[in-house]
Amino acid sequence: MNRSIIAVGNSRGIRIPKALLEQSGFAKDQKVELRAKQGIIEVVASAPTVPVREVKMTQSVGDGASEVSILSESALAKDWSQPEEDTAWAFLQ
């Protein structure tokens, strides 16, 4: 199937026929990654983004009650990405 490269604002583009998109399995508004080699442009589905993971920590605060803290991965990374943490856990590597 031959197509022409067309102007799209200051960029260039290619119109992709609906039948070809359906064959590829790409959904409307799906994120894709473009890869280029000499004479070839690949359109590849982007890897799914990883949601921020949360860790729930329960701590006893006396009288049988507990307090729950939720820490996001970014908050944990700030504390865990310290040089002293690397030193403390080096023996496991």
Image (cartoon, rainbow, N blue to C red):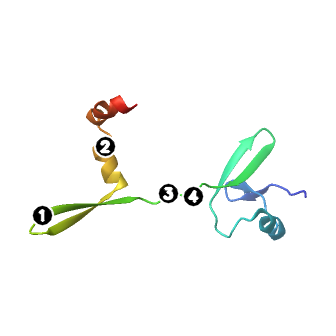
Task: Answer few, some or many: residues within 10 Å of disc 4's Cα (few below 14, many 20 plus, some between 14 and 19).
Answer: few
**In the displayed image of the protein, which residue is found farthest to the front?**
64
Name the mark on residue 50. 3
Q: Quadrant of residue 55?
A: bottom left
Q: Quadrant of residue 25?
A: bottom right
Quadrant in the picture for the C terminus: top left
SS type, badge 2: helix
Q: Quick check: 85 above or below 34? A: above
Between discs 1 and 4, the one toward the N terminus? 4
SS type, badge 3: loop
Between discs 1 and 2, the one toward the N terminus? 1
Residue that mark 1 sits on: 61
- Amino acid on which disc 1 is placed: Val
Q: Is any part of residue 16 visible from this angle?
A: no
Quadrant in the picture for the N terminus: bottom right
Name the mark on residue 80. 2
Between discs 3 and 1, the one toward the N terminus? 3
Residue that mark 4 sits on: 48
- List x then y, in percent, for residue 58: 23, 62
Q: CA distance from mark 1 to mark 4?
A: 39 Å
